Image (cartoon, grey):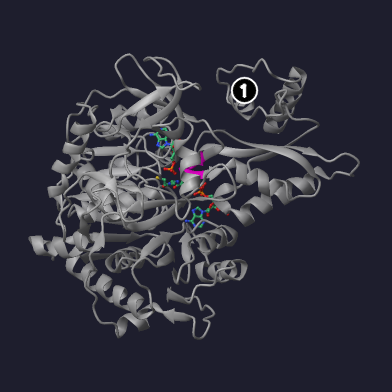
Amino acid sequence: MEQLVHHNDLMKFWMSVTDRIPWYQKPTKAYGIAEDGLNHWFPDGKLNTSYLALDHQVEQGRGEAVAIYYDSPVTKSKTKLSYKELLESVEKMAFVLDSLNVKKGDTVVIYMPMIPEALVSMLACARIGAVHSVVFGGFAPHELAVRLDDCRPKVVITASYGIEVSKIIPYKPLLDEAMHLSTHKPESVILKSRPNLEVIMHTGRDFDWDELMETAGRKKSVPVSSADPLYILYTSGTTGKPKGVVRDNGGHAIAMHYSMEKIYDMKPTEVFFAASDVGWVVGHSYIVYAPLIYGCSTVLYEGKPVKTPDAGAFYRIIEEYKVKTLFCAPTAFRAIRKEDPNGKELSKYNISSLKYLFLAGERTDPVTYDWACDLLKVPVVDHWWQTETGWAIAANMMGESPLPAKAGSATKPVKGFDVRILDEEGHELKNGEKGNIVIKLPLPPGCLPTLWNDYPNFESSYLSHYPGYYLTGDGGYFDEDGYLFILGRIDDVINVAGHRLSTGEMEEIVAENHSIAESAVIGIGDEIKGQVPIAIVVCKDGLVIDQKAIDSDLTHRIREKIGAIASLKAVVFVKRLPKTRSGKILRKTMRKMIDGEEYSIPSTIDDPSILDEVMDAVRLKMLK
Ligand code: COA
Ligand code: AMP
């Protein structure tokens, strides 16, 4: 893959792809300081992302083409929306938001299940230059409240409930609780009612989606600056405060369009199925924006890879909608393999339309990779990216110059990403040597220009460790052929079933139990979910300890505060935690020992016998 090493080549290259989309005002320069005082791509360009995704597609003659295939096994319903129909709904919702006093630059939180109205809401915000922040439905009220306080939305859009396999998730009551907990109180709530559940409406604050839409006019898209924020998406960092990743309009639109062709090898009107959730970055980029900006049909799937109703669900969708590219987290295929290892379900469907399976969100283990290759008989592409970048940093670019794949590798950096491996002192490492993965600045279009209202945190989290480079937070190496291998996080972030969570935050929650003196929460390997958290805890001296009660209290607290997706796999009670002489807990060493990986015990360890004690306690607990 050709790499762009020189600054001028890089600028010329990105300028050359700006013609891919229509602009209200074409950019005259590739990169520079915009009105907000920060560096952005195409800083003097003006565009509207909702226009690109809708009006422009209709103008290209795709008005009757399907924009969204909504497929919901949990409600036993299916619908399709053409580009024209989607445009009409978005125009109306944009009108509604405008009449609720949402103006350009205002924020709107979207807390919704996987229903078309979630996409309509996102695109309606983009249409009027409002900044949306979608919060994943699996997060508990406390997490939602933290986000409400950080981005201070004027309006929240929600639905009465979502369905998880067969369990009702009561979104509106959860939102009410979050709004009770938050300091910031949004002015209005828009509720999409779903059948068979009455919810309490607060007069003067809560409005019914259907009623508002019935009388709504239509709102045209407004030009926004390329540098203006399109959305904020919160992601876990190392503390309890999530990071508000900002996505600007211009760079994002270019990255989305470019990636659909060059990475995913798509053509307009073909069908893309990203089996994620709109609450995650994969959902933002590849359920909503990229497929629509590129004129494809997107599948919006309100279900699971298994149990809704069985492990054949993805294959059914591929057959029914003639999906060309499927994108999901490896955990989904591990779950399918567990239930249907020999592909009995697959044999019931015709999946000849499928050309690629793309995997991301966590490491693809070679066993799952080989199994999926053998079963599906299409290229399985492991690609590596993060909420912060919004699209793949490393991938096999199937629409550009596909390379022979290597199991366990995300192939090579995507054109425009200058990836290096550095040691702790900032020296560049040779192929084969493991270190911290960084990206030389500037980051390509689509990547975050800052954190919401917190440039200092952006700098200290990502830029100050190695001046001139963005710290990805992942460790890895290039092999002798220049293929990139991702080894996992170097910080306190873990990936549970493709969901990014902070162990630092979990430790803060564990500390709220008055019996706990200190703890280490670490993510350990799990056959299906990739990683699951365990808490290794030390109780205060002099207390009568009821381990069973503490265990259930900690598990309950983490579910209550973060959400069910974060539940602890085990609580291990120990007398002391292994530390260095300066007091740093040896989390990484413990994790590697538990997972049976190669590890080295730091020479600065305070008392090696503590590590042995803790490992014995963990083994004993895991055997139970
Ligand atoms: N809203 C509310 N609750 C949710 C939720 C959501 N959107 N998603 C998950 N949960 C809850 C589940 O109901 C479950 O609760 P429970 O413990 O009370 O039963 C808990 O969180 C754990 O769920 P999950 O992580 O989904 O585990 P699982 O064992 O039910 O299913 C998989 C395992 C692999 C099938 C499932 O994790 C999966 O589909 N993963 C793919 C994830 C994905 O697409 N990630 C996107 C990244 S690209
Ligand atoms: P998120 O921001 O939720 O997308 O999570 C990003 C993190 O997931 C990355 O920093 C990696 O640790 C991990 N990740 C994503 N894709 C891959 C991949 N293909 N291989 C290994 N790890 C991955």
Q: Quadrant of residue 181?
A: bottom right
Q: Residue furthest left?
A: 61
Residue at x 69% of width, y 27% of height? 619
Magenta residues span 495-500
Q: Secondary structure at mark 1?
A: helix
| Residue 515 relative to residue 377: left or right | right
Residue at x 30% of width, y 54% of height? 227
Residue 353 visible in the displayed image: no
| Image quarter (top left, top right, bottom left or bottom right) of the C terminus | top right
Q: What secondary structure is the magenta-colored segment mainly?
A: strand
| Residue 404 relative to residue 36: left or right | left
For the residue pair 452 and 34, the one nearer the viewer reads as: 34
Residue 485 visible in the displayed image: yes
For the residue pair 124 and 83, the one nearer the viewer reads as: 124
Query: Vertical placement of 565 versus 355: above or below?
Result: below
Q: Residues within 10 Å of mark 1 (few under 14, many from 20)?
A: some
For the residue pair 520 and 86, the one nearer the viewer reads as: 520
| Residue 478 relative to residue 161: left or right | left
Q: Name the residue beneath numbered marker 1.
A: 593
User: Disc 1 marks which amino acid?
Assistant: Met
Query: Vertical placement of 498 versus 10: above or below?
Result: below
Query: Vertical placement of 18 versus 79: above or below?
Result: above
Residue at x 66% of width, y 27% of height? 586
Is residue 393 on the magenta stretch?
A: no
Residue 13 placement (x, y as % from top left): 17, 37
| Image quarter (top left, top right, bottom left or bottom right) of the N terminus | top left
